[in-house]
Amino acid sequence: MENNIIEVSNVTKVLGGHAVLSDINFQVPKGLVFGILGPNGSGKTTLLRILLGLITPDTGEVKVLGQNPVSMTREDKNGIGFVLEDHGVNERLTAYQNIDFFAQVYGLAKEKRRARILEMLDKVDLSAYIKKPVGTFSKGMKQRLSLARALIHEPRILFLDEPTSNLDPEGTVYIRNLILKLSSEEGITIYINSHDLDEVERICTRIVIMKHGNIMLQGAMADLLRPNNQTTLEVKLEESEAFPKLVNLLNTLSFVTHFKIEKGAAFIELIDDSSRLTLFNTLAQNSIPIKEITQIKNSLEDLYISIVKEEEHHEVQ
């Protein structure tokens, strides 16, 4: 489809007589932050290598920017940027020299390179370290430099392998905010391989969870984290004496599928998302003294663990 930056159709890959990927199917729409999750050995790295055109699938088809990544011309590949987990920076060179080397590889004209390099170093807050050897940098600074280098040729899609691995909290927050900015303000599609469930939950719009070369679950983050695919609200009241009135009202509402009063709050399950506004209006019309309303969702960690453990249970059976 025209709006999909990545299309993976029926992809299978066998290595050493073992099916590393089995009938993989998904799409990544333009401008999204997309996450691939899975334990070691799930096939994430093999899939990334296929998407970068480093290896070919045994069966199925892959398209990145509408083309087979293996047969892309050098010009076509300029639409792709990537940062692997080990950074790949040359620690003997300065920050400027590291980016300049890649700018030349991507064919940027000499008159354009300097301005673009300075722009990228400023984007990742490394302008003050332009002449410093990269060997003196912290892990977070090296990761920021790697991102600047990957963006030097203005790619349309950026592949990131464990972008916050081994970073301190400050570095993690910085990378998180930069990824979100690249997606929302510059329209770059971001593809992330990661074990960091908390960060994926914070930044990814869509995810795929893999295990043993199979896709176990995929979809929009907001939909997947809704418990039982329902909308559940936690309602706290200004006055505890109003709970009986709230209970009587909820018993009359056809769009409320279930509710319970627990720990000083009402937990209300609605038939669908569109019923939220109707509930808010109904509570206001009946003078229910609302203090706070929060939508309840699962955490990605809960979802991930439940899928992995369920699969392990089936394997034991």
Image (tube, grey):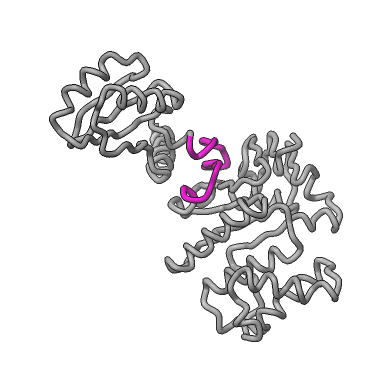
Which sits in the foreground, 82 or 247?
A: 247
The picture places residue 177, in percent across and down from the top left corner, at 53, 59
Q: Residue at x 79, y 58 (%)?
A: 78
Left or right for 19, reference 271: right
Q: Residue at x 59, y 58 (%)?
A: 161
Left or right for 231, reference 242: right
Magenta stretch: give its range: 200-222
Image quarter in which the N terminus is found: top right
The picture places residue 172, in percent across and down from the top left corner, at 48, 63
Q: Residue at x 66, y 43 (%)?
A: 14
Q: How many marks?
A: 0
Which sits in the foreground, 30 or 239?
A: 239
The image quadrant of residue 259 is: top left
Q: Residue at x 76, y 37 (%)?
A: 2
The picture places residue 271, in percent across and down from the top left corner, at 40, 20
The answer to whether residue 262 is above or below residue 84 is above
- Can I make out residue 54 in this image? no
Left or right for 291, reference 152: left
Image quarter in which the C terminus is found: top left
Residue 183 inside the magenta-drawn segment: no
The picture places residue 287, in percent across and down from the top left corner, at 25, 26
- Can I make out residue 130 in this image? yes
